Amino acid sequence: MHIWFVSMSKVLFRQMMIKRRNQVKQEDVLEKSRFIERSLTDHVRYQQANNILFYVSYGNEVNTHHLIQKALENGRTICVPISDIKTRTLHIAHLISWDNLAPGAYGILEPKKDKQRFVSLDHIDLIIVPGVAFDRKGNRLGHGKGYYDWLISKIPNVYSIGLAFSFQIVERIPVEPKDRAVDLIITEHDIIECSRTRSQRDDLE
């Protein structure tokens, strides 16, 4: 899919992409998410990671619920974000059990107050990132709050993987100084090595 929205505001483009995502049937979301899950768990970056930060999906995002549950069952060390609405930053908590989650900010599942065990950002060695849209250079359009741009800027050397459905990959996303790209994108059809693309682009510039 090729969409280029230079003449369209980010707000309108975001609304269009979210509307399209919301139109996907739930069974299709789950089916495509399982393909993405297999590609992620087979990837060497995932297999070598010790402390993985997952987003907890909501709505029609690429579903991570099964991914997180399986990782916990397999004894992986899993962390999840807790949104600080006042500062628009993320606190990172160690997740011991799926049952410790409850709806928090924006209705997204977060650890319950009495189950929150915070960890420092330097403990994370892999971030799994959501997005409304991505381009093949790893540039990302989120929900406009800036949480993950802030997070990646705080730990820029940590490898980041964006999960998306194939229709969410667009031709080009204009970037602003605060925006942060991901290193890899996994869709149900493709694995896109963005870090390599960015280095090639930098060489040309």
Image (spheres, rainbow, N blue to C red):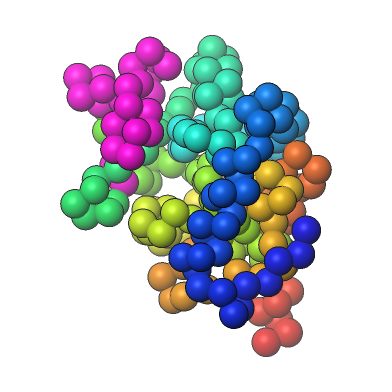
Q: What residue appears at the point 56 percent right and 36 percent down from the top-left corner?
A: 60
Residue 179 within the segment the image draws in magenta: no
User: Front-most of 126 and 139?
Assistant: 139
Highlighted magenta segment, given as a residue range = 90-116
In x, y percent, where is residue 148? 42, 53
**Residue at the bottom extreme?**
205
Picture quarter with the C terminus: bottom right
Q: Is residue 182 left or right of residue 179?
A: right
In x, y percent, where is residue 168? 66, 52
In x, y percent, where is residue 14? 52, 59
In x, y percent, where is residue 59? 50, 35
Q: What residue appears at the point 46 percent right and 25 percent down from the top-left corner?
A: 77
User: Front-most of 118 and 34?
Assistant: 34
Residue 106 within the segment the image draws in magenta: yes
Picture quarter with the N terminus: bottom right
Is residue 193 at all visible to an observer of this figure?
yes
User: Front-most of 71 and 122?
Assistant: 71
Q: Is residue 41 left or right of residue 127?
A: right
Q: Is residue 11 left or right of residue 34?
A: left
- Residue 169's place in the image compared with 25, above or below, is below
Q: What residue appears at the point 20 percent right and 24 percent down from the top-left corner?
A: 113
Q: How many marks?
A: 0
